Amino acid sequence: MRRITKSSRLTSTPRGDRCADWPVEVDPIYGCEIWRGKRSTDGYPELWVGGRNRRAYYIAWERARGPVPQGKELDHTCRRTLCVAVAHLEVVSRSENERRKQWARTSKRAICAAGHDLWLHGRRTPQAGIVCLICSGLK
Ligand SMILES: [Zn+2]
Ligand SMILES: [Zn+2]
């Protein structure tokens, strides 16, 4: 009954939970929750859940916000692929073109997903993303 044990352990909230099942390190400048666990071969944070490897930020999102709609995927506003902070994730269209547009928009956007003014509350990441300091719990 290994699967049941694993999924029941995953019911705890990810944020700030630095146990072995959720190994993250919080970046105090940007509020990123940098994954310190296993990585996939292409460099994404990886977690073994329900009998398969999944990107850890999807697990974080699903636990906080519910399933990502069909045909959509998660994108990092901070543009740090190892970040699993729900406040730094957005649901975007799976199409590569739209995703590129989204990235371009991310670097110039004026408000965060929660409506905060990013000119006042945003902080640019070294990866040319932007994070909302209010949503990241830094303001
Ligand atoms: Zn981040
Ligand atoms: Zn915000």
Image (spheres, rainbow, N blue to C red):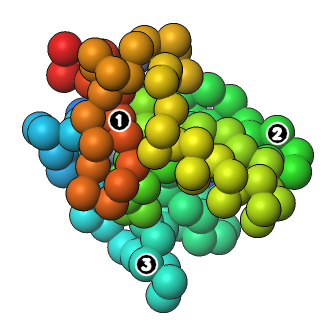
Badge 1: residue crowd in 10 Å (few <14, some 14–19, many ≥20): many
Q: In which quarter of the image is residue 3?
A: bottom right
Amino acid type, label 2 = Pro
At x 36%, y 55%, the residue is 128
At x 48%, y 24%, the residue is 110
Q: Could you give the CA–CA distance between mark 1 and mark 2, rounded to whole angstroms? A: 23 Å
Amino acid type, label 1 = Val
SS category of the residue bearing label 1: strand
Would residue 130 appear left or right of 114 to someone viewing this image?
A: left
SS category of the residue bearing label 3: loop
Badge 3: residue crowd in 10 Å (few <14, some 14–19, many ≥20): few
Would residue 52 appear left or right of 127 to someone viewing this image?
A: right
> Mark 3 or 1 closer to N-term?
3
The answer to whether the beta carbon of the residue marked 1 is less than 8 Å from any atom of ligand 1 is yes
Amino acid type, label 3 = Gly
Is label 1 or label 2 in front? 1
Depicted 15 relative to depicted 35: above or below: above
Q: In this rendered view, identify the residue nearer to me: 7 or 1.
A: 7
Tell me if I can see residue 130 in this picture: yes
Depicted 72 relative to depicted 47: above or below: above
> Mark 1 or 2 closer to N-term?
2
Depicted 74 relative to depicted 121: above or below: below
The residue that disc 3 covers is: 43
Task: Give x and y (percent) for residue 27.
Answer: 16, 45
Tell me if I can see residue 21 in this picture: no
The residue that disc 2 covers is: 69
The residue that disc 1 covers is: 131
